[in-house]
Image (spheres, rainbow, N blue to C red):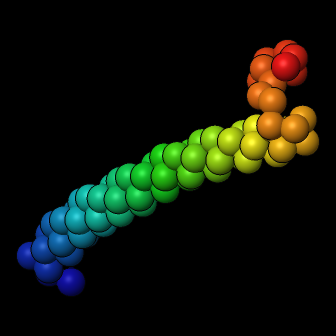
Amino acid sequence: MSDAILTFQVQLSTVMETVLKSAMYEITRLVEDSFLEEVARSKQEVEALRQRLQWSESRRRERESGGRARCLDCGRV
């Protein structure tokens, strides 16, 4: 092959490698951002469910004790 073709191939290879690395970086960043958003949503959902469970358990305890409220920390009326 001529020197011009070899030079072109090297330059093209270098450009393609740079493009590939940039694309991999962007894809990884997008996936990471999406993952972090999903984790944050999951944490919020877990917290909301935990609060609903505590509320439901509190209501159940009130019904079982004849409507008298109990301390959530120690269980005393």
Number of numbered callouts drawn: 0
Depth order, front residue of 47/16:
47
Q: Is residue 64 above or below residue 3?
A: above
Q: Residue furthest bottom?
A: 1
In the displayed structure, does residue 24 sit left or right of residue 22? right
Q: Can the viewer see residue 17?
A: no
Q: Which x, y percent locates residue 24?
A: 36, 61
Q: Going by the picture, which residue comes out furthest to the left?
A: 4
Q: Measuring 65% from the left and 47% from the top, which residue is drawn there?
A: 52
Q: Is residue 2 visible?
A: yes
Q: Quadrant of residue 9?
A: bottom left
Give me the residue at 72% from left, 39% from top: 54
Q: Position of residue 45 (x, y in %)?
A: 56, 51
Q: Nearer the viewer, residue 44 or 69?
A: 69
- Give the residue at x 19% y 65%: 15
Q: Quadrant of the N terminus?
A: bottom left
The residue located at (52%, 46%) in the rendering is 44
Left or right of 26 in this view: 44: right
Of 2 and 26, the residue lying toward us: 26
Residue 4 in percent (x, y) is at 9, 76
**Quadrant showing the C terminus:** top right
